[in-house]
Amino acid sequence: MLVQILFYIFGTLLVACALGLITARNPVYSALFLVLCFVNSAVIWLLTEAEFLAIVLVLVYVGAVMVLFLFVVMMLDINVAELRRGFTRFAWLGWITAAAVIAEILVVVWSHGLTGLDVTRTPVPEPADYSNTAALGQVIYTRYAYPFELAAVLLLVAIVAAIALTMRHRQGLKVQDVSRQVSVRAADRVRIVKVEAEKRT
Amino acid sequence: MLQTLATAWGSLPGIARTTVWIVIVTVVLILCVAFLTLWERKVIGWMQLRRGPNRVKLLGLFPGLGQPFADVFKLLTKEVVIPTNANKLLFWVAPMIALIPAFAAWAVIPLSPDLVISQANAGLLYLLALTSMGVYGVIIAGWAANSKYAFLGAMRSAAQMVAYEIAMGFALVGVLMASGSMNLGTIVRNQEGGFLSQNWFWLFPLLVVYFISGVAETNRAPFDVAEGESEIVAGFHVEYSGIAFALFFLAEYANMILISALTAVFFFGGWLSPWQGWPGIGATLLGQPSFIWLALKIFAILFMFLWLRATFPRYRYDQIMRLGWKALIPVTLVWIGVEMVLAHYHVGPWARPWFH
């Protein structure tokens, strides 16, 4: 009963935040609404006893990805009117995407015969010493070891590609060489000149 | 009298007992923050051959002890100025966002062998998630104030905190490998056996990385470029006054206590006695686990924070980034590799029964 009440509270909040995300005029508000969306979905995942995924969602998306996102959104002075000009022209694309996602959700909910997974029933509570993280780790490193490694390599390639794309060697850039800065001695920088005192004439 | 109190306590429902503990921990924490500010000024004063605060007396005695209360009342009675064109809602919300994670994190910290507010299995992950949320207070404060200095401070601290969080997370991966659990109580219990079998001995590089990252995460000297009085006035909280400023202050010091407590739990055995299980001294009262050991460890680590502040000049910004990305992260990665070798040969923490 308590779980259901919590689910409806956070579900409503999630939908409200999602609406705020797409209707807010200020892009910084949009980004903050997205953060709230992540937090609310994390709570809903907690209610389904997926505590590892829920905390990782907060840790990765709220703690790292959205911080950088906010960082960029705050730095760039985005002209919202400019962005909104194409709204009606591209609306059909948005509707198609929304319809596809809704259809996917419906298929998952109604076709438990297909996957053998009934997502509509509440999960049976696990005993207190059951560790979600350990269970997940056991599956990832044994049964799904190859897909997991493949995803890791894919991410690595993405990192290398992102760095390669953005790293440019400009001419005439003044860069500090820290090892040279550290190894410098006083004798390299200061020359002590002994000036002979002149005799009074 | 005590008997009736104990039975009344036992007959309370679980949720009421938890609430009472939450209130106690929060109030004690706020008092600790108050006296930590005084202790900091005193210690730095002594280090600089001054006397520190010594005018305001508490109950007519103890010169200087009343200083934190005088400060709080001064800040409470000051006007909170909201800059024109500031984003009012976010301006008010930011100090709260900075403060909440610093207090909420205490839910999973084991205070004594049988006292912890929540026995969460994923306690370590919960801590990582909460400490990563503290940065929002800083960013939102810097942006909402609509001031260039505040914004510069927010940008600096956001980049710094994201960078050091990675090193911190990796250091905790090492702790995780040595303890085999994400429950903080189990992490403490797996360090039993006295001073030398606690995690700091086998994970010393990780301890250093964790502590440095902790100092950087709390934006303390020598990593306090987010405030940088000499360059950007006071950084992200330059536009805050009165009690709103005090909330940021409270959050910073609460975070310092939190980082100290976590260092004590992860690397120095939390509430375990350093002489536990030693012949002779281990059998006496000094060998018993208790809250006092945790408090002493937290106090010693907090002193390190103050010591650093009184000793080191501020880092240059590019040096901070260099240290975080090019020094601390590689150290943690190498040490995780070393741990794999140690685990393979069942050395140190991996000779314990849980690993077999």
Image (cartoon, helix red, strand yellow):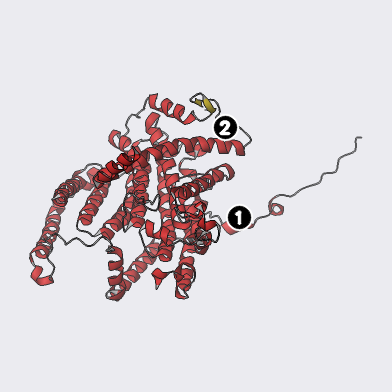
Q: Quadrant of residue A101?
A: bottom left
Observer able to see residue A163:
yes
Q: Is residue B94 visible?
A: no
Question: In the picture shown, does residue A57 fall above or below B35?
Answer: below
Q: Is residue B81 left or right of A79 when viewed as pictured? A: right
Q: Quadrant of residue B174?
A: bottom left
Going by the numbered disc 2, the residue's amino acid type is Gly
Marks 1 and 2 on same chain: no
Residue at 53 percent of width and 29 percent of height: B64
Chain letter behind tag 2: B
The residue under label 2 is B52
Q: Mark 1: give few (<14), some (14-19) or many (20+) Cα within 10 Å.
A: few
- Asked whether B190 or B46 is in front, the reply is B190
Q: Residue furthest right?
A: A201
Horizontal and vertical percent position of residue B301: 51, 48
Dot 2 falls on a residue whose secondary structure is: loop
The three-letter code of the residue at mark 1 reads Gln
Q: Is A11 positioned to the left or the right of B223 in the image?
A: left
Q: How far apart, in angstroms, are the residues tagged by discs 1 and 2?
A: 37 Å
Residue at the image position 42 percent from the left and 58 percent from the top: B188
Disc 1 is attached to a residue of which chain? Answer: A
Query: Is B42 displayed left or right of B239 in the figure?
Result: right
Q: Residues within 10 Å of mark 2 (few under 14, many from 20)?
A: some
Measured as percent of width and height from the top left, residue B344 is found at: 45, 75
Nearest the viewer among A81 and B56 is B56
What number is the disc on residue A181?
1
